[in-house]
Amino acid sequence: MAKRKNRSVKAIVGNKDFLTSLFSGAIYGSPWFRGGVHQETPKEIYQAARDCNECAEDIWADVLLQGGFVLIEDFEDGVDYKISLKDVEKGFRRFMVDDPRHYADIMLEEADFYGYDALLQTIVFGEVQYA
């Protein structure tokens, strides 16, 4: 049964629409986060993502899906974080348990800034730090 659960989480976080919604929902207008492509992402991955997308959030999603990294800049503590698709998966698993209300909203495609922000904070910090 655990393997079945693992596959569904991998399928969710490995979905471009999910990742684009996460970044759009959490970063657009955020008082504490800004996103980008991390400098450790191979140039060919970044270039391929740029060639196929116009929207920054779509580029970041493609970068993650191709094995690159997204940069999350935290205005509150002045620290930059490098996240991978594995980090998204790990954070999402924790988020499912820690914040079932926002998790349900995301799965029903009814999430707002607060739900996506809570998810991104869980991915970056392992918990919600900013309310």
Image (cartoon, rainbow, N blue to C red):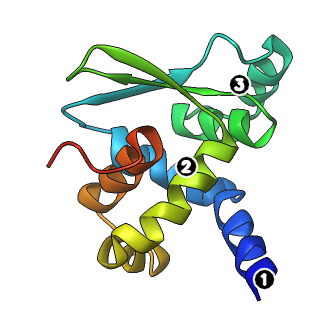
Q: Are marks 3 and 1 in contact (CB under 8 Å)?
A: no
Of badges 2 and 1, nearer the viewer stands: 1
18 over 110 or under it: above or below: above
Q: Secondary structure at mark 3?
A: helix
Q: Circle 1 is placed at which residue position?
A: 4
Of badges 2 and 3, nearer the viewer stands: 2
Which residue does the image show at 74% across and 29% down from the upper left? 49
Relative image position of residue 124 (x, y in whole percent): 44, 38
Q: Give the spatial CA distance, label 2 vs label 1.
A: 24 Å
Q: Secondary structure at mark 1?
A: helix
Q: Circle 2 is placed at which residue position?
A: 20
Relative image position of residue 48 (x, y in whole percent): 82, 25
Q: Secondary structure at mark 2?
A: helix
Q: Circle 3 is placed at which residue position?
A: 50
In the image, 121 versus 31, the foreground residue is: 121
Q: Counting other residues with Cα less than 10 Å from the Cα at mark 3, is it few (<14), some (14-19), or many (20 or more)?
A: some
113 over 67 or under it: above or below: below
Give the amino acid type for the residue marked by disc 1 in the picture: Arg
Left or right: where 31 falls relative to 5 = left
Picture quadrant where residue 30 is located: top left
Q: Give the spatial CA distance, label 2 vs label 3.
A: 14 Å
Give the amino acid type for the residue marked by disc 2 in the picture: Thr
Q: Earlier in the sequence, mark 3 or mark 1?
A: 1
Which residue does the image show at 51% across and 53% down from the upper left? 91
Give the number of the disc on residue 97: none
Picture quadrant where residue 54 is located: top right
- Name the residue furthest left: 131
Q: Counting other residues with Cα less than 10 Å from the Cα at mark 2, is it few (<14), some (14-19), or many (20 or more)?
A: some
